[in-house]
Image: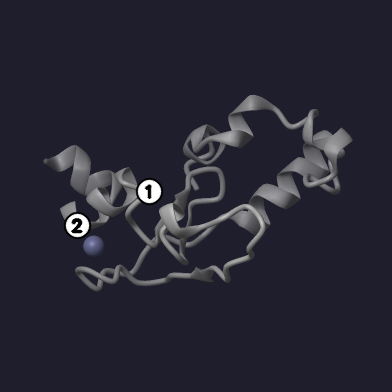
């Protein structure tokens, strides 16, 4: 239980994150970003759904940790010279740790 509570604010959030096909909540571990959109099961490849960043848990109201998208961009640029991580060529140069939560956990962010 402590481990679950330490990783996510509550069991409802954990359930929502672990069932991405049914849930409108998406957790991106690489940037520690929570977004809300349509459940993946409803998404189709030829449609674009808006996604909204979520700052508070919709279940328990807890303030969610700060997203690290800016920090990730900055470190990739200053330490690895990657200034456009969405570019197909540069994307291949992104170290593996930056595709998960490893990089920000290592840096205690
Ligand atoms: Zn919660």
Q: Position of residue 103 (x, y in %)?
A: 56, 35
Which residue is at 41% across, 59% downward? 39
- Quarter-wise, where is residue 16 in the image? bottom left
Closest to the observer: 33 or 46? 46
Q: Secondary structure at mark 1?
A: loop
Report the side of 69 relative to 4 (left or right). right
Residue of label 2:
12
Q: Vertical placement of 37 versus 95: above or below?
A: below
Q: Position of residue 47 (x, y in %)?
A: 63, 63
Residue of label 1:
20
Which residue is at 63% across, 52% downward? 45
Q: Position of residue 10 (x, y in %)?
A: 19, 56
Which residue is at 43% across, 70% downward? 54
Number of the front mark, 1 or 2: 1
Q: Vertical placement of 10 versus 54: above or below?
A: above
Closest to the observer: 65 or 60? 60
| Label 1 residue near ligand 1, CB within 8 Å | no
Query: Which quarter holds ligand 1?
Result: bottom left
Disc 1: CA contacts within 10 A as few (<14), some (14-19) or many (>=20): some
| Label 2 residue near ligand 1, CB within 8 Å | yes
- Quarter-wise, where is residue 7 in the image? top left
- Quarter-wise, where is residue 51 in the image? bottom right
Which residue is at 81% across, 43% downward? 78
Give the Cα separation between the discs numbered 1 and 2: 13 Å
Q: Secondary structure at mark 2?
A: helix
Disc 2: CA contacts within 10 A as few (<14), some (14-19) or many (>=20): some
Q: For the N terminus, which image quadrant? A: top left
N-term mark: 1 or 2: 2
Q: Position of residue 97 (x, y in %)?
A: 59, 29
The answer to whether residue 101 is seen in the rendering is yes
How many marks the image carries: the answer is 2
């Amino acid at each position: 239980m402590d481990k679950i509570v330490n990783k996510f604010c509550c069991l409802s959030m954990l359930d929502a994150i672990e069932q991405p096909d049914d849930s409108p909540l998406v957790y991106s571990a690489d940037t520690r970003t929570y977004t809300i959109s349509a459940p993946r099961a409803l998404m189709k490849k030829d449609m674009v759904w808006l996604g909204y960043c979520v700052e508070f848990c919709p279940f328990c109201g807890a303030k969610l940790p700060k997203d690290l998208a800016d920090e990730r961009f900055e470190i990739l640029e200053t330490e690895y010279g990657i200034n456009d991580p969405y570019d197909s060529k540069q994307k291949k140069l992104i170290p593996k740790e930056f595709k998960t939560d490893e990089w920000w956990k290592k840096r205690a962010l």
